[in-house]
Amino acid sequence: MLSEPRSGRLAAWGNALLAGNVSPDDAVIAIVGEDAVHRVEGLPGETAPVGLTLALGRLRTLRVRGLRVALPAPGHPLGLSGPPEFNKRALEAEEAVVCHGAGYGLVPEVYEAGPDGDVHVEVVWHCLPVREAPPADVPSLGEAERELAEALRDATAVLSRLDLAGSGPVAEAAIDAYRARAERGREVLAPGYPPRAVRVLELAQRVGLLVSLAEENGPGGAVSSAEMAARAQALRPVERTGRRALVAAYNSMVEERESR
């Protein structure tokens, strides 16, 4: 995965803000990133969309103690707890943030405008009711780290045998972009996250990069239907494992705080 999900940025820096580790201005700047603006719609007590600074402050007054990430996919409601309406919206967006301590969740809707090279991106987070229950299928950091190492080893062996691990100028450019980003900002999570969460997130991003390269580079050496099926079979569990690890990393500050 070459860039973090918006839900990850919101949860990580929102958690750092709730813990008193960063200022509201720093949190909002990090969450917005390269987007133009983020707003929150449907917040209790507000009749119109509001800015992130006000929204994060309001969530605190609503007794929100932490923010968790959900990265669901068809057949895999990762990080979700219901109700069906929220799950449906989150699945359509492929991501969401679930509040811990209050029954609310946030699902992003992205609007883009402008020509190539000068795209203006606005994000509206829709605040919806959620069921306060344990999130679905989220591993611990330790479990995620072990699963990632095993999945990466197995998938690399299969993809290399099929000549599908990614090669050529497109793959090389993607790898260079990933390395440049990693070197540019070593703070992959917000202040206050445990070092193990940073390791798990970085490894999950590398796993996502491998999956993306294998998917985007076409059939490669898989000249038969059997080889193409083998590639899909190899990628499916590693992609799932990568998403589970991302969620575990982003949610670790909440889990660590609640275990004390």
Image: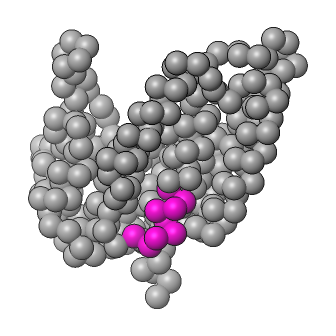
What residue do we see at 19% from left, 19% from top? 118
Q: Estimate the x, y position of residue 82 in percent, counting from the top left.
A: 51, 53
214 relative position to 249: left or right: right
| Number of numbered discs on residues | 0
What residue do we see at 13% from left, 48% from top? 51
Q: Is residue 173 visible?
A: yes
Q: Estimate the x, y position of residue 76 in percent, counting from the top left.
A: 63, 44
Q: Estimate the x, y position of residue 100 in percent, counting from the top left.
A: 39, 68
Majority secondary structure in the magenta region: helix
* Stretch of the chain drawn in magenta: 193-201
Which one is in front, 161 or 9? 161
What residue do we see at 46% from left, 62% from top? 198
241 relative position to 93: left or right: right
Q: Estimate the x, y position of residue 152 in percent, counting from the top left.
A: 70, 47
User: Relative to 119, is 35 above or below?
Assistant: below
1 relative position to 142: left or right: left
